[in-house]
Image (tube, rainbow, N blue to C red):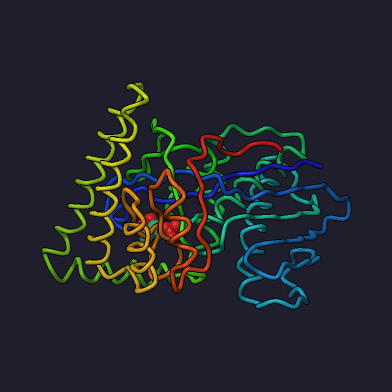
């Protein structure tokens, strides 16, 4: 039996613009999905999931299309099982063991579909645990590649490499097209607000595409996001190896850029009343900056605040279901 875990992520900057070839900077956060895998000899899969913002469920099936008989929303179960299945397919392929079955337990601290990369973390940890259980140790790069293929398959081609690469490597990452690399970043004091909902990524991406095609100034807005991401990268680079006492200035500048990024995402129509309310609650509480993270429309915001003020303010903000601290996680996928 092997247990592996992998982190979720926030976008420090650049979501949506990354779809048009601009760079983006996702950062892994200290909220992890943990997957335990044990081989079974009968070729069947048994999946037990807890804390997936679902009620938790257990299903046992042979993977031949039979519908699991469980007591939670079929859509949610189907989505969760789709990712676990795709991870199992990748692990079987990597270990050249197409008939092997598993008992799988998933335990995640990352809300589902809320812009925090929950599915990527489950897939990354699942591939690592299942291959190790079969005696195969993949490199972090190979886990990232196979996790991307799994997400690509489940999301019918609508997957970027950002979530899976970031979850596999941990830390801060720079993504531009298919080019993903780790970058240095100081310890960033992330605080997250969650409105309990989720946006429809496909619809939100299509909305931005439509605006961009219709108005040159919307296209300019997308490339301006690229400009601020490049500025953010310079700020992070300057912070690396510098006097640790200079970090507050770095956090302040990153916060300013996050505020700017949120304004541009709002202009592109991907924020929402609850996201805006949480962003303003964070700013009013003294956060250095705040923005939505991920596709938008609902889900999570991320703020930078080394004090407890933002977390407290979010807890009292109407429409905010959870406010929590989740510092930059430099540890990617690992065995527990
Ligand atoms: O909500 P998430 O974490 O899946 O992020 C979506 C990010 C987008 O840039 C809007 C889409 C994408 O695939 O990059």
In the rendered image of this protein, does residue 241 appear above or below residue 89? above
Q: Position of residue 7 (x, y in %)?
A: 56, 45
Side of 92 where 147 appears, left or right: left
Taking the image as shown, residue 110 lies to the left or right of residue 1, namely: left
Q: Closest to the observer: 241 or 49? A: 241
Please state which of residues 164 and 314 is positioned toward the viewer in this rendering: 314
Q: Is residue 102 above or below residue 273?
A: above
Q: Residue at x 38, y 47 (%)?
A: 304
For the image shown, how many numbered marks are present on the structure? Answer: 0
Q: Residue furthest right?
A: 41
Q: Is residue 177 left or right of residue 36?
A: left
Q: Residue 15, image x and y in percent?
A: 34, 55
Which residue sits at x=74%, y=49%?
98
Residue nearest the observer in this picture, 280 or 64: 280
Q: Is residue 131 visible?
A: yes
Residue sticking out furthest to the left = 216
Task: For ligand 1, give the image quadrant.
Answer: bottom left
Which quadrant is the N terminus positioned in? top right
The residue sitting at 55% across, 62% down in the picture is 154
Q: Is residue 40 left or right of residue 335?
A: right
Residue sitting nearer the eye, 37 or 110: 110
Q: Would you place residue 277 above or below residue 230 in this image?
A: below
- x, y (%) of residue 140? 56, 34
* Percent x, y of residue 217: 11, 63
Residue at point 51%, 38% (across, down): 170
User: Which of the image's four quarters has the C terminus?
Assistant: top right
Residue 156 visible within the image? no
């Amino acid at each position: 039996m092997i247990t592996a875990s992998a982190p979720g992520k926030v976008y420090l900057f650049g979501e949506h613009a990354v779809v048009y070839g601009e760079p983006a900077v996702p950062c892994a956060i200290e909220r992890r999905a943990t997957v335990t895998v044990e081989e079974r000899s009968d070729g069947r899969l048994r999946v037990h999931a807890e804390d997936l913002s679902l009620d938790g469920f257990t299903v046992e099936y042979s993977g031949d299309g039979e519908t699991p008989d469980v007591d939670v929303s079929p859509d949610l179960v189907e989505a969760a099982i789709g990712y676990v299945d795709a991870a199992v397919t990748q692990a079987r392929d990597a270990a050249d063991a197409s008939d092997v079955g598993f008992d799988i337990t998933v335990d995640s601290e990352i809300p589902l579909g809320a812009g925090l990369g929950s599915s990527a973390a489950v897939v990354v940890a699942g591939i690592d645990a299942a291959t190790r259980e079969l005696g195969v140790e993949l490199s972090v790069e190979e886990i990232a590649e196979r996790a991307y293929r799994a997400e690509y398959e489940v999301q019918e081609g609508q997957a970027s490499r950002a979530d899976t690469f970031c979850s596999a490597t941990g830390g801060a990452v720079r993504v531009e097209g298919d080019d993903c690399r780790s970058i240095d970043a100081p310890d960033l004091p992330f605080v997250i607000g969650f409105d309990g909902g989720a946006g429809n990524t496909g619809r939100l991406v299509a909305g931005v595409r439509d605006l961009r095609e219709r108005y040159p100034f919307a296209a300019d807005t997308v490339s301006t996001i690229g400009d601020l991401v490049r500025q953010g990268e310079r700020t992070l680079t300057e912070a690396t190896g510098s006097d640790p006492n200079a970090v507050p200035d770095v956090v302040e500048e990153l916060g300013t850029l996050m505020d700017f990024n949120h304004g541009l995402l709002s202009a592109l129509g991907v924020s929402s009343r609850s996201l805006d309310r949480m962003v303003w609650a964070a700013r009013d509480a003294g956060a250095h900056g705040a923005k939505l993270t991920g596709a938008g429309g609902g889900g999570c915001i991320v703020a930078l605040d080394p004090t407890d003020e933002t977390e407290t303010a979010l807890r009292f903000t109407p429409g905010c279901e959870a406010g929590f601290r989740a510092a930059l996680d430099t540890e990617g996928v690992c065995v527990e």
